[in-house]
Amino acid sequence: MHDVIDIDDLTAAEIRDVYELTDDIKASPEAYHDSLSNETLLMFFAKPSTRTRVSFEAGMTQLGGHAIYFPEDQSQMSRGESLKDTAKVLSRYTDAIMARLFDHETMVELAEYADVPVINGLTDLLHPCQALSDVYTLREHGIDDGPLAFVGDGNNVAQSLMQLCATMDIPCRIATPSGYEPDAIIQDRVADADVTVTNDPVEAVSGAKAVYTDVFVSMGQSEEKTDAFEGYQVTPELMDHSDDAKFMHCLPAHRGEEVDAAVMDGPNSIVYDQAENRQHVQKAVLHRLLAD
Ligand code: CP
Ligand code: NVA
């Protein structure tokens, strides 16, 4: 493993290895307390974050290393410094870069210019660290044989999930409003897998063992789009079509918008397990990138 910017950068064997290492780190965190001593992670953010920032930063501390929070608006890039110069210089100071950016192409360029590993902490197109943690969570709950249903916007979170389901042979059903389907390029990449895309939430959820949703309005998007999502809220009635499914959400959640509070706070919700696993899985990724 060098960069983690796209699930398709990873093989199924590498993902299984990360999950086995995650099991060990989660069971015996003290055994890894010095594994990244003197290593520094640069965390570059062009968008807000709660989970990604804190799970990576505390994760580096727990591995004996250090993390630097570096918001774009406090960098010289906000005054016109080039991505190339920024990536080259940061690579001289630090051991890895985790970035949250708007355009995915900028992430690809960052990885090309950087001389250290680059981890994608979300772009408009993909959120691979989220998907890796989500499938680890499915595995922990014994439901990684699927089907996994996703209802909502077919953008970054859904797109990384469908890629990872395809890699790990997990049946995946995506339901989006018309016009919010996953990118055609991502759909093409999973064309040979058991991944279906529909505009019908009931069809997607029927028989599912996990039902997943994400915000209707992603960071940087206009609030006006929410009208298109009427009928795509995850409600107890929609969950009744599933196979007693667990409820999943990458968070942040908006009760009363993409999910009914009764589902979000109900007995089948595993959203906090997902959030916790961000940290365990990312520690395993950091260990593989920096300690080996
Ligand atoms: N799920 C997720 O990436 O959360 P943050 O936006 O808080 O980092
Ligand atoms: N789709 C959401 C995910 C947040 C973690 C967004 O891009 O804002």
Image (spheres, rainbow, N blue to C red):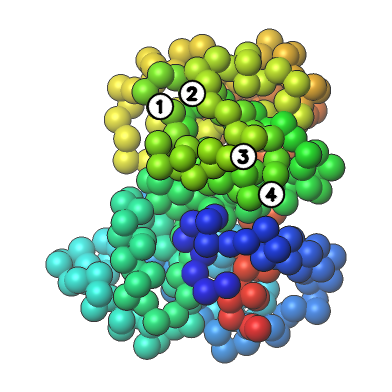
Q: CA distance from mark 4 to mark 1?
A: 25 Å
Mark 3 crowdedness (10 Å alpha carbons): few <14, some 14-19, many ≥20: some
**Residue 203, percent from left and from top:** 63, 15
**Tag on residue 193?**
3
Residue 252 appears in the figure: no
Disc 2: which residue = 176
CA gap, disc 1 to disc 2?
6 Å
Q: Secondary structure at mark 2?
A: loop
First in residue order: circle 2 vs circle 3: 2
Q: Residue at x 64, y 75 (%)?
A: 288
Q: Earlier in the sequence, mark 4 or mark 1?
A: 4
Residue type of the residue flagged with mark 1: Tyr
Q: Quadrant of residue 18?
A: bottom right
Residue at the disc numbered 1: 180
Q: Nearer the viewer, residue 14 or 238?
A: 14
Which mark lies nearer to you, 3 or 4? 3
- Judge whether residue 171 can be spotted in this image: yes
Contact between labelled residues 4 and 3, with CB atoms less than 8 Å apart: no
- Name the kind of residue labelled 3 in the image: Ala
Foreground label between 1 and 3: 3
Task: Name the N-terminal-most of marks 4 and 2.
Answer: 4
Ligand 1 near label 4 (Cβ, under 8 Å)?
no
Element on which disc 1 rests: loop
Against 250, residue 89 (above or below) is below
Question: Gap between marks 3 and 4, in whole Å?
Answer: 10 Å
Q: Which residue in the structure is indicated by mark 4?
A: 168
